[in-house]
Image (cartoon, rainbow, N blue to C red):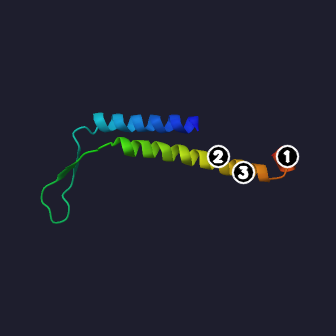
Amino acid sequence: ALLALAAAVTGALVTYGAGRSLLGRGITMPPAPGMTLPSQVFLVFSPTDTVTVVALTVGVAIGGAALVAVRVLRGPIVRGLKVA
């Protein structure tokens, strides 16, 4: 859980930094059908979305580890001790 939390926070910080530095002026998109002028698209980071993404990342990591743990616990001990 701590590794997933660290990875999620690091990913959010890197994404925020890239969005502020590399894409600070926005991204020029080609005109949509029926339009003649291009449009500017900006990356906006809301704190609520960031917390949600971090929580989902940690939840998925914990859920994946729990599934593996349940599978190992339900298997026979001999299979766990067998050398591959």
| As drawn, 4 above or below 64 | above
Give the residue drawn at x 29%, y 35%.
20
Q: Residue at x 60, y 45 (%)?
A: 62
Horizontal and vertical percent position of residue 82: 85, 46
- The Cα–Cα distance between marks 3 and 1, rounded to whole angstroms, is 19 Å
Q: Residues within 10 Å of mark 1 (few under 14, many from 20)?
A: few
Tell me the residue that label 2 is attached to: 65
Residue drawn at x 61%, y 49% is: 63
Q: Amino acid at mark 1?
A: Lys
Residue 49: percent from the left, percent from the top?
38, 46
Q: Residue at x 47, y 42 (%)?
A: 54
Q: If you read the primary sequence from the N terminus, does the residue marked by circle 2 or circle 3 appear first?
A: 2
Residue carrying label 3: 70
Residue 66 visible, this angle: yes
The local crowd at label 2, few if under 14, some if 14 to 19, many if 20 or more residues have their Cα within 10 Å, is few
Residue type at mark 3: give it.
Answer: Val
- Evaluate if marks 1 and 2 touch, with contact meaning CB atoms under 8 Å apart: no
Residue at label 1? 82
